[in-house]
Image: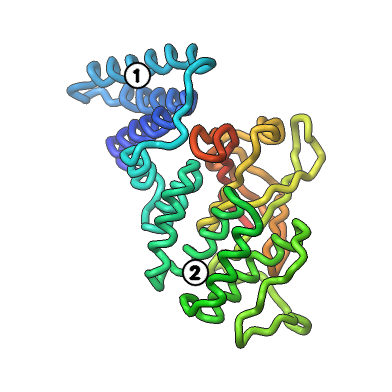
Amino acid sequence: MNISLKIKSLLNEAEVYRSQGLLNEAREKYQAASGLITKIDKLKNKDSLLRAIAEKIQFIDKKSAKTGTAPSSPELSEKGQDLIKNLFGENDLEKAVALAKFGQFERALAEFQALLKNEAYRLEAGKNIIRCKLATASLDDAVAQYQQWFSQDLFSAVQLESIRVYLQPILDKKGFGTPLPVPVGEKDDADGIEFSMPEPEEEMLDITSIGITFTNGTHKGKMVEFDVNFQSGDMLSLIVAKNDRGMIEDLNEGDDIEDVQFYSPIAMFKGTAVVATKTAIQSGPKQGDFCLDLKILTA
């Protein structure tokens, strides 16, 4: 990336983090931008830029000292939500996923619903609507949504079966008794069908959960399983409850994670991943929880 674009990106990300109340993350982005600016000898407004960033960092430091009494906004402004979309999504689907990852579930759901009209995004939008309902509501709401689609003709039988195959194992795992109805034309019994891992050029499988074997910290040598709340290709997003923050305190951005167990509705396989981001959710129904983004490296 061009260095000027990199600096602009860092400053924009810092503003998003600051607006979210993620003061430490915002400070890191400002400091990274300052470091890049310092290396550019011929930058005409170098000093003024560095002073402006220094003032931003000073403001953050002052605000950090007051966070114990400062109230948190339950939702970002529309402008803040738009900024998240533009920074963290390259297409309409990724932008809606970005909103969900930052705790803006209400608007994310509205945008996923709008994407159902687009054949190119319909299936993934449907799966992400289910993911949002699982993250913010209940199993009953997710099941009700599937049953509504089952009674309509919005999805083809193949598409609806893909959603059922994603949701049913989650319901089974959580002890939900009633199986989802199978779309007409699809067999409920998978006996005799052999599934194999996709070739590298094929689309990534839906991952419902992962198991991480920790190599250090309080969970060293133990495998901890996490549900996957959102997925965009090979990028997995896990929402970790604030009470479980101790399980991920030793994971930092850029850390490689070896021996990851991936679970999908049709396969179980091992691979490696890298920590893309780890942020605290500062608004919405998941306020106080953490979003851990992992990029699958090998599978």
Name the foreground residue: 110 vs 270. Answer: 110
Q: What percent of the width, then of the height, locates residue 47?
A: 24, 16
Assign a secondary structure to mark 1.
helix
Is residue 224 shown left or right of residue 275? right
Residue at 33% over, 24% down: 39
Q: What percent of the width, then of the height, locates residue 211?
A: 73, 50
Q: Residue 56 carries which label?
A: 1
Residue at 50% over, 45% down: 101
Assign a secondary structure to mark 2.
helix
Circle 2 residue = 123
Q: Which mark is residue 188?
A: none
The local crowd at label 2, few if under 14, some if 14 to 19, many if 20 or more residues have their Cα within 10 Å, is many
Residue 297, visible in the rendered structure: no
Q: Quadrant location of the N terminus?
A: top left
At label 2, the amino acid type is Leu
Residue at 48% over, 41% down: 102
Residue at 60% over, 64% down: 144
Q: What percent of the width, then of the height, locates residue 209?
A: 68, 54
Q: What percent of the width, then of the height, locates residue 27?
A: 43, 23
Residue 203, visible in the rendered structure: yes
Looking at the image, which residue sits at the far right? 221
Q: Quadrant location of the C terminus?
A: bottom right
At label 1, the amino acid type is Lys
Name the foreground residue: 277 vs 265. Answer: 265
Instruction: Answer above or below: position of 24 versus 283.
Output: above
Is residue 100 shown left or right of residue 273? left
- Determine which quarter of the picture holds residue 267: bottom right
Residues at marks 2 and 1, CA–CA distance in whole angstroms: 42 Å
Instruction: Answer above or below: position of 12 versus 293.
Output: above
- Determine which quarter of the picture holds residue 246: top right
Instruction: Answer above or below: position of 70 versus 97.
Output: above
